[in-house]
Image (tube, grey):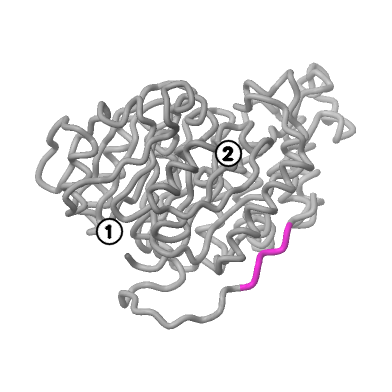
């Protein structure tokens, strides 16, 4: 795997920030984006076949080189607007140069109970021989049965199908939003619900704990806790969060994060928002994302039926209409709603194609898939500038620009 080189830091800028703000800080969905974490898809996507794509959570078999071209264009669109782009592959390789981190990540792979003692010993020897860049590739793209010559004579290796993986690939690592989420100057490393994705957070966890870039970062959450995914967490405004509860995030996960951000003074209000437990609405950001300080793009079929439970330091209240509860918590009169599509059929199609899943670069400036023609037109009619990117191959894993990005630094709102 060719690991892309991280872009250089953006030039120094003069701006007023709270005293505790360094190069990690997120207090909204829409303020000027300064640094973002992406993962350029690589050999892990080439591991997808009709035999395994369902279990690895992809709806199709992507054309890998085209997916890389689309992702490169996405990254360049961000860089051209002054955003520093960090690549997950770079950070993993750099983290693996540290003995403690290497031992931790290797142990995580070897703890897989499917291996058995003989194959585990063979895999341990194989991993020990790899340089950091190659080891990063193995941790991301997996290790196929045919890539190691034997399993040390063990029964597990001999009984495996030759098309099986000794270490499973992580094609969903593309969606960096899910494995971590920043709230002001702290990060929640999440607990992913689907078995195919759980090892992703071991990589993210190691980066934030060991990489010099993130030295001293305090963790709000870790993968051992209740299920919580970053696609379900919206930082609506300073000290106001919404957490979707559905297919991937449990009520207990939402409650745990709410308790922690409130206790730490990072939020005064958290809205727990039940969403349908379906593939099309796996996360809150598949039906609602922010495009301005007072505006959301939202799937119209649920916009005015979505409810929220309001969690504060003193009590839990609700349910009540989400849009009403969100506006009150944000201290505004109302949230403007920009619909996905103009008619029910178009709205349903464009919601499935991640029409709601926009990434705000700044207030009234967002990145969206070009194929969602009607939604993008609606955004522009509402005064939102849309940076269109291609996503015919990237979208096969059911994720849009927001899913593929983890903001690490934004200007304070």
Neighbour tally class for label 1: few under 14, some 14-19, many 20 plus, Cα within 10 Å? some
Decide which of 296, 222 is in the foreground and name it. Answer: 296
Whether residue 110 is visible to the viewer of this picture, yes or no, is no
Q: Quadrant of residue 309?
A: top left
x then y, percent, for residue 103: 64, 52
Give residue 112's mark.
none
Is 337 on the left or on the right of 67, as rendered? left
Image location of residue 403, percent across then percent down? 52, 43
Residue 2, relative to residue 341: is it above or below? below
Q: Is residue 135 visible?
A: yes
Relative to 75, say whether 150 is above or below.
Answer: above
Residue at coordinates 46% horizontally, 57% vertically from top-left? 365
> Mark 1 falls on what kind of element?
loop
Nearest the viewer among 407 and 353 is 353
Q: Main secondary structure of the magenta part?
A: loop
State the residue position of label 2. 199
Judge from the rendering whether residue 83 lies leftward or rightward of residue 109; answer left or right.
left
Find residue 159 and report its image quarter.
top right
Residue found at x 48% / y 42%:
377
Query: How far is the residue under mark 1 from the one under mark 2?
Result: 31 Å
Q: Position of residue 60 (x, y in %)?
A: 68, 25
Check residue 340 for magenta coloring. no
Element type at marker 2?
Answer: loop
**Residue stretch in magenta:** 4-8
Which mark's residue is nearer the viewer, 1 or 2? Answer: 1
Residue assigned mark 1: 238
Q: Residue at x 52, y 64 (%)?
A: 35
* Depth check, front residue: 118 or 38: 38
């Amino acid at each position: 795997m060719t690991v892309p080189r991280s872009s250089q830091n953006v030039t120094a800028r003069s701006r007023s920030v709270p005293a505790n703000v360094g190069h990690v800080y997120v207090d909204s969905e829409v303020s000027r984006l300064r640094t973002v974490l992406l993962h350029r898809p690589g050999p892990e996507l080439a591991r997808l076949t009709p035999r395994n794509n369902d279990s690895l959570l992809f709806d199709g078999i992507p054309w890998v080189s085209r997916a890389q071209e689309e992702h490169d264009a996405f990254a360049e669109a961000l860089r051209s607007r002054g955003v520093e782009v960090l690549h997950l592959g770079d950070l993993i390789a750099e983290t693996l140069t540290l003995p403690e981190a290497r031992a931790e990540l290797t142990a995580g792979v070897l703890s897989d109970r499917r291996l058995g003692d003989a194959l585990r010993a063979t895999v341990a020897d194989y991993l020990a021989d790899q340089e950091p860049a190659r080891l990063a590739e193995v941790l991301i793209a997996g290790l196929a049965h045919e890539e190691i010559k034997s399993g040390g004579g063990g029964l597990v290796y001999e009984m495996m199908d030759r098309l099986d993986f000794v270490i499973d690939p992580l094609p969903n690592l593309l969606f960096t939003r899910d494995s971590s989420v920043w709230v002001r100057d702290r990060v929640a490393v999440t607990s992913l619900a689907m078995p195919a994705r759980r090892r992703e957070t071991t990589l993210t966890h190691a980066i934030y704990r060991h990489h010099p870039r993130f030295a001293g970062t305090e963790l709000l959450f870790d993968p051992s806790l209740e299920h919580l995914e970053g696609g379900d967490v919206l930082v609506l405004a300073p000290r106001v969060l919404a957490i979707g509860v559905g297919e991937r995030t449990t009520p207990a996960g939402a409650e745990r994060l709410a308790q922690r951000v409130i206790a730490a003074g990072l939020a005064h209000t958290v809205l727990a928002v039940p969403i349908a437990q379906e593939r099309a609405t796996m996360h809150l950001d598949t039906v609602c994302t922010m495009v301005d300080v007072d505006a959301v793009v939202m799937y119209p079929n649920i916009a005015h039926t979505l409810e929220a439970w309001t969690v504060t330091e003193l009590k839990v209240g609700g349910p009540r209409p989400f849009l009403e509860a969100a506006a009150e918590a944000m201290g505004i009169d109302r949230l403007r709603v920009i619909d996905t599509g103009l008619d029910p059929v178009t709205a349903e199609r464009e919601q499935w194609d991640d029409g709601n899943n926009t990434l705000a670069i700044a207030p009234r400036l967002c990145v969206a898939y070009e194929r969602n023609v009607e939604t993008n037109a609606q955004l522009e009619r509402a005064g939102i500038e849309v940076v269109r990117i291609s996503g015919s191959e990237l979208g096969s894993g059911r994720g849009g620009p927001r899913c593929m990005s983890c903001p690490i630094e934004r200007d304070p709102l």
